[in-house]
Every structure is written in C-alpha cells, then in structure tokens.
Image (cartoon, rainbow, N blue to C red):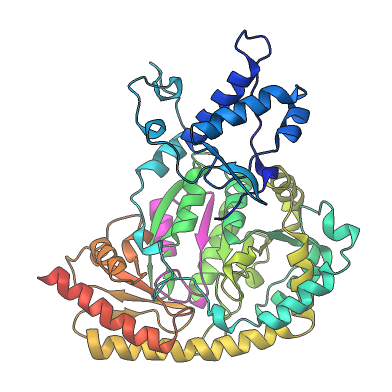
Amino acid sequence: MKFVPTSFFPPVALDLTKRIPMYRQLYEWFRDAIVSGQLRPGQRVPSTRALAAELNISRVPVLNAYEQLQAEGYLQTLVGSGTTISESVPDHATRPTTTARKSDVRPKSANRISRIGTEALSTPPQVWLDSLGPFRSSLPALEHFPNRIWSKLVSRHLSVPSRQLMAYGDPMGYMPFREAIAEYLGAARAVRCDPREVMVVTGSQQGLQLCAKVLFNPGDPIWMEDPGYPGAHQAFSSAGVRMIPIPVDHEGILVKEGLRRCPAANGAYLTPSHQYPTGSTMSASRRVEILQWAAKSGSWIIEDDYDSEFRFESRPIGALQGLDTRSSVIYLGTFSKVLFPALRLGYVVVPPRLVQAFSAVRDAADIFSSTLYQVVLTDFIREGHFARHLRRMRTLYMERRSVLVDAIHSQLGGMLEVIGAEAGMHLVALLPPGIDDRQVARQAAQDGISAMPLSMCQLTKQARGGLILGYGGTDTTEIQDGVRKLRASLDKLAK
C-alpha cells in the first residue's frame, strides 16, 4: 500500500463552544472526511499524542475517537506503519443519502461568469490535442534535444544558486539573456534592437496578450490574417479587440483588401516570414505596402516570427521589423518550437517608447519569467549549443518534411492537396470541397492521429477545409504509419 505523509493531513475542525463531546466531534470529522474522499485509503493519520498537541486538547478524546473509528472499520493499525485510513471503507458509509448537502443546493440566482468564460465553456473539445500522436502541430523533435548538455548547464547554476537566481527578477527579463537574444536576432533575423528593448515572456502567447492589453482598447479594430493563428484569435478576442479578417494568398496578407474593409484599423497581426498556417512568405512589395499603411495611419504591426529558423527551399527571410523606420512593428518570437514547449520562454521586441508600458503591464500579470531558465539558456546560446542544435534540427525537419510529402502523394494523392511545405514544422493538406475537416480530425484522433483541422484557423468560412500536419515531433517511421492511419480514417468517413 502507498502511504501519504501526515504532513499533508488536512486541518481538523473542532468547535469548543458546542455541547457535543470532543471525542464525538473528532469521530464525526474523521468519518465525514473519509467518506467524502478528503482522506484516502492508506493515508497515515497523526498519532494520538501529536493530534492532541496540535489541537491543544487532552489526549483522552483523541484516543476514544480513534478507538471508535477502528471499531467501525474506518481506521486500521499496522505494525511499524502507525494508524492509517482503512483500505476498505464500510459499505454503509458509501451509500448515497437522500438529504442534499448545502453545497449541492443551487442558489435561486446563480453566480455569473464573464463573456470570456462563457465563450470558453461553449468551445467544442479539441480532441486532436488530447495526445502527442503523429502530426501534432508545433511539437519539435524532443528526442533530439541535447538533454545531457542542458542538464549540465542547469546543474552548474543550481549547485550553488546565487541570490539573484532565487530572488524576484526584472519584468523585462535577465539582462545577459536579453543581450544574447538581441545579438542572435540581429545576426539571424536582421532585427534592429537594443537589449533594453527586449522583453522576456513565457512564450509568444503571453507576448500576444501583452500586445492586446498595451496597444488596444476594447472595440479597436485589428487586421487578422484569415486563415491565421488560433492563439492570436484567442488573445485579441479575450481583450475585446475587434478582429477584421483579411484574406491571404501566396504573397501574404492582401493589404489592398485590408484598406477596403477597414483602412483605419489600429493594428495588424502578421506572420510574414512563414504565414500560419498556409506557409506563404510575404513578398517584398507587400511588406512595403503594409509598412507604408502603418506609417500613414499610425497603426501597429505585430509580427509573429514563430518558426522562421526552419526554411528549406531558400535562406531564411529577414524580419519585417528590420525594414521598419517608424518604430511601428512589435516583434515576437519563441523558444518553444526550436527547443521544447515546457521551457516557456519567448521574447517581445518593443519600440523604445513602449518599453515602460509593456514592463508595467507585465509586472501586473506575473512579474517575471523563470530566472533559472533564462540564465541556463544564456549559456546555451553563448557557448554555441543553440546554433548547433538549430543546424541539426533544420536538416532533420527537411528529411521529415520530404518523407511526409512523398507519403501523402503516394497514399493520399487523390484525396489531399499539399500546400506550405517549403518551411517550418508543419504543412497543410487540403481536403476535397464539401468535406468537414473537424469531422475528419475527430475521426483521426480516435485512430491515434493528432491533426488539427484548418477551419480552427479561419475567422470566415472558406471553400475548402484541410488538416494541419506537424512533422517536427514525428519521426519517419511514425510519419509512414500515420499517413496509413489517416487514409483509414478518411475511408471510414467515406463509407
């Protein structure tokens, strides 16, 4: 039997003003706690001496209560293990009673929840996220992460942790880490920034939420790529920002359509280097158009550069932020996809005039990110491990992408059309018109496949649905098997 330490024992409630004897109160408290599951089978209970001392009462009522509980089968005493909750509670104790507890009675006027909470309750379950099966989007190749090197770096700082490592941190982040990020972004992404303009966040999702709070008021309009990143939809919707869906094509967001639909929008959310989810890259002419619009209208551009490190057909495209001369672009990135999601570290590069506002809003949210991981990742970058890992992953993902594309063409060529396979860690497989991609995703989830439906990314209903197939965290053997299972799922729905 597994024993639970007595240090986790819940506080015992006694009312010394009642006429009910103390031993009886103790007996009833223990019985109710056992029946309700608050105390679990095998859990140790305090000794009579320890409980009496804790309650500041005589040991006699505790002894009497324990004896009664043992006699009725609620407690058991094992040699060398002390007194524990019985493995089997008496049958009569678990029988339902006809008297409703006060907590079960619904009040005449139920407590209300917010619009955000109501929308969350009405969202259908995303069963394709219930497992880490083949094709889970945004999942990197975790088995290839250099755990040994990472563990050594963690141990280096935990063996004798500094006061700075264990105390409160700067809402903007650990300065040496911000310096390393700024150096990396300048060299690899042509981002122009000073380390003081870099804010460390717990992933790009928090960066989006901060942008929504700092840059917009409820009701303000913002251009959103359609289809686009669902996490951005959630961040801006929860802040009450009015999302204006703007179509995308092979050159990125249609700026002229944005000007037609809402020329005075307060901002635009973009994934220009690798459009999520279609995979297109914003052309040079579109980049000039969107920057000219932002400069003329005084609007903000939020650039989400979520996986630009992985480009296979050509060299990585420079960031839109590097072309911005009016400080209109807020640049977001994350380490979740290039390292591992549980790291929960990302960054936001903000214009100088926004640094104080972002810092204050971040401080009110969760103060700062884990200093330990910031310190460790600083060493990981400075010592060259990060660059080496990126090179290995770029080669690995190129191979996995090629295997997936070939498998789809050979096994599902007449059923799926592949788009957006030139970069990143996922591709989109379009379904024939009229097929419900959410129904396909649900069936695939039952067959062990974690494929997100394309419609989850759409703000407006579009002619064709599809599946977002991640290949970063799926090896070549799993890819081949996953495509076969996906074919079986489609065949089931066709019957």
Residue 260 coordinates in the image, percent (x, y): 39, 55
Asked if one can make out residue 163 in the rendered structure from this viewpoint, the answer is yes
Q: Residue 264 magenta-drawn?
A: yes
> Which of the two residues, 235 or 440, is positioned nearer the viewer here?
440
Which residue is most to the left? 495
Q: Quadrant of the N terminus?
A: bottom right
Q: In percent of the image, x 82 and y 51: which residue is there?
A: 168
> Which of the two residues, 414 or 152, is positioned nearer the viewer here?
152
Q: In percent of the image, x 27 and y 89: which residue is there?
A: 409
Relative to residue 18, is residue 474 drawn left or right? left
Q: In percent of the image, x 36 and y 57: which residue is there?
A: 126
Q: Is residue 487 above or below residue 115?
A: below
Q: Residue 301 magenta-drawn?
A: no
Q: Is residue 267 above or below residue 491?
A: above
Q: In percent of the image, x 38 and y 84: which residue is there?
A: 478
What is the total number of numbered labels drawn onto the structure image? 0
Asked if one can make out residue 194 in the rendered structure from this viewpoint, the answer is no
Specify the quadrant of the image occupied by residue 323.
bottom right
Residue 194 coordinates in the image, percent (x, y): 79, 67
Specify the quadrant of the image occupied by residue 165.
bottom right
Instruction: Read off the magenta span.
Output: 255-284
Residue 312 coordinates in the image, percent (x, y): 50, 88
Prevalent SS, magenta region:
loop
Q: Is residue 396 above or below residue 327?
A: below
> Which of the two residues, 4 or 160, is positioned nearer the viewer here?
4
Q: Quadrant of the C terminus?
A: bottom left
Q: Is residue 375 above or below residue 461?
A: below
Residue 42 coordinates in the image, percent (x, y): 55, 48
